[in-house]
């Protein structure tokens, strides 16, 4: 039997008088691709926001590999390996494609601001390693040839792939994809489907809406 990587019990979110989620029980097995299906307004994105710590739950509990997350802030959940993309793509417009992916690695770097500012050897070596790893994820999503382009010069479909590459650069255990196929044509959706399978085969659990 597969390990349960994510579980919610009685998860509820109320905004004022609006019940956005009502006692949601969810179980996601590690190493699988799972999907949450429902109409617009059903609370799917709200569920992702609760799982990643954007909003606190009104009631209920979230468990990641058996550990309760109720009081864990968003950055701590990301450190544990829960990472998401958004329905609307958020990229750094003043950076290249490669630099956008490198930002996903920086929270895991061991050098500090002073070392980077002084261009000390340790910072330089680690920055080179981060760049190489970022290229690995760009190649995985098929954007390696666009590494030096401005991120916002890419068409929407490739921007979505870039957002996924940046999320993968954080080395997540659980990747949440919020409507990744929205706005894509049939060919782009097929390429996205193939990519999600490759991500799963590489060892990352995927949950999408």
Image (cartoon, rainbow, N blue to C red):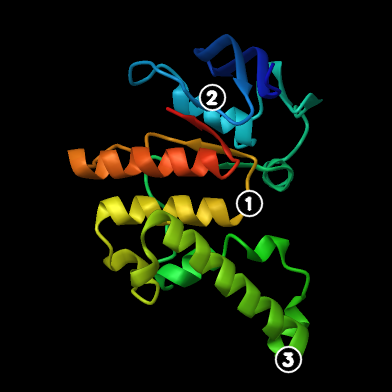
Q: At 77% across and 75% down in the image, what residue appears? A: 111
Task: Please report contact status of discs 2 and 1: CB closer than 8 Å, yes or no.
Answer: no
Give the crowd class for mark 2: few <14, some 14-19, many >=20 residues within 10 Å: many
Q: Which residue is mark 1?
A: 171
Q: Is residue 194 left or right of residue 73?
A: left
Task: Please report contact status of discs 3 and 2: CB closer than 8 Å, yes or no.
Answer: no
Give the crowd class for mark 1: few <14, some 14-19, many >=20 residues within 10 Å: some
Q: Earlier in the sequence, mark 3 or mark 1?
A: 3
- Residue 105 to residue 145: above or below: above
Mark 2–mark 1 Cα distance, whole angstroms, equals: 22 Å
**Which corner quadrant holds the N terminus?**
top right
Q: Is residue 64 left or right of residue 23?
A: right
* Numbered disc in front, either 2 or 1: 1
Q: Which residue is mark 3?
A: 118
Q: At 38% across and 50% down in the image, what residue appears? A: 89
Residue 44 % position (x, y): 46, 23
> Which one is in front, 80 or 75?
80
Element at label 1: loop
Element at label 2: helix
Res. 85 in view: no
Mark 3–mark 1 Cα distance, whole angstroms, equals: 28 Å
Res. 129 in view: yes
Total labels drawn: 3
Q: Quadrant of residue 122 in the image? A: bottom right
Q: Which residue is mark 2?
A: 47
> Which one is in front, 44 or 131?
131
Residue 33 % position (x, y): 50, 28
Residue 10 % position (x, y): 66, 9
**Which corner quadrant holds the C terminus?**
top left
Give the crowd class for mark 3: few <14, some 14-19, many >=20 residues within 10 Å: few
């Amino acid at each position: 039997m597969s390990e349960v990587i994510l579980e919610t019990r009685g998860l509820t979110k109320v905004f004022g008088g609006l019940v956005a989620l009502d006692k949601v029980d969810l179980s996601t097995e590690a190493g699988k691709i799972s999907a949450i299906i429902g109409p617009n307004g059903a609370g799917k994105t709200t569920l992702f926001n609760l799982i990643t710590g954007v909003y606190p739950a009104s009631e209920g509990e979230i468990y990641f590999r058996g550990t309760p997350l109720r009081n864990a802030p968003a950055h701590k959940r990301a450190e544990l390996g829960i990472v998401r993309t958004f329905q609307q793509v958020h990229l750094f417009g003043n950076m290249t494609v490669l630099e956008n992916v490198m930002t996903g690695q920086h929270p895991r770097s061991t050098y500090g601001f002073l070392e980077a500012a002084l261009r000390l050897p340790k910072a330089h070596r680690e920055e080179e390693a981060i760049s190489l790893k970022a290229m690995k994820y760009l190649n995985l999503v098929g954007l390696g040839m666009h590494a030096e382009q401005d991120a916002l010069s890419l068409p929407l479909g490739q921007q979505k792939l870039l957002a996924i590459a940046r999320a993968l650069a954080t080395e997540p255990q659980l990747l949440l994809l919020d409507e990744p196929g929205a706005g894509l044509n049939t060919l782009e959706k097929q390429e996205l489907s193939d990519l999600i399978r490759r991500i799963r085969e590489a060892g990352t659990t995927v949950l999408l809406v």
